[in-house]
Amino acid sequence: MPPLLRAQALSLYRRVLRESRSTIPYRRAYRYVYEDILRNMFRDSTIPYSPSRFENTVTLIRMARLVRGNERRLLKNVIDIGWNRQMRAKEKLPKGYGKLVERSLFKKLYADYDITMKMVSETMDVYLPDDVKYYERTHSWFGRKRK
């Protein structure tokens, strides 16, 4: 499949974002977390473009709004894990806590979840976030020097 063009990515991002805003009205912070997740997914230029997969993603979000079933639980789980990742990345650890321990704990903490989300997204043929590298790169304390 060809990679996603910038104009296509913007159009699809806005469409999915519009659907998600009407689906996630219950907490403002959760809405911002899901916007961050979507922004990260569409910022990556290596996403293979598949019209049916995007339609399935929009349908999943729409069904999460209309029916309180597995779709809603799946979407809420994605948002909860995204929220926890952001909060864990922002929290200050006690002084003297080893950097090696920090890195190994953070990498192992969400490894099973990421593998499961990848399998679910392939099975349902939808786009779901399964990239822990984004959080290591933008939200975490990896590589920062402590003062």
Image (tube, rainbow, N blue to C red):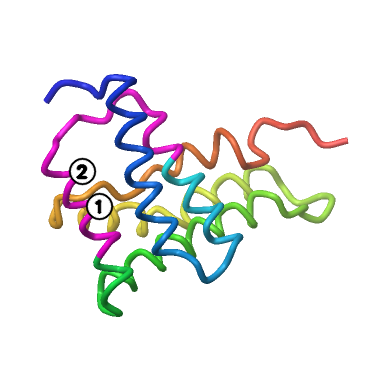
Q: Residues within 10 Å of mark 2 (few under 14, many from 20)?
A: some
The answer to if 66 sits in the magenta stretch is no
Residue 77 versus residue 116 in the image, above or below: below
Would you say 36 lies left or right of 141 here? left
Q: Name the residue furthest bottom.
A: 68
At 46% across and 61% down in the image, what residue appears? 79
Q: Position of residue 129 (x, y in %)?
A: 36, 48
At label 1, which amino acid type do we have? Answer: Val
Tell me the chief SS of the magenta region.
Answer: helix
Q: Secondary structure at mark 1?
A: helix
The residue beneath circle 1 is 58
- Circles 2 and 1, Cβ within 8 Å, touching? The answer is yes
Question: Quick one: quadrant of the C terminus?
Answer: top right
At label 2, which amino acid type do we have? Answer: Phe
Residue 1, quarter of picture: top left
Residue 78 versus residue 139 in the image, above or below: below
At 25% across and 50% down in the image, what residue appears? 118
At 84% across and 51% down in the image, what residue appears? 95
Q: Nearer the viewer, residue 107 or 55?
A: 55
At 70% across and 50% down in the image, what residue appears? 90
Q: Secondary structure at mark 2?
A: helix
The residue beneath circle 2 is 54
Q: Residues within 10 Å of mark 1 (few under 14, many from 20)?
A: many
Q: Position of residue 100 (x, y in %)?
A: 63, 43
* Badge number at residue 127: none
Alpha carbon separation for disc pair 2 and 1 = 6 Å
Q: Position of residue 81 (x, y in %)?
A: 48, 61
Would you say 42 lies left or right of 1 here? right
Q: Which residues make up the magenta segment?
A: 39-62
Would you say 62 lies left or right of 50 here? right
Q: Position of residue 119 (x, y in %)?
A: 20, 54
Q: Nearer the viewer, residue 58 or 114?
A: 58
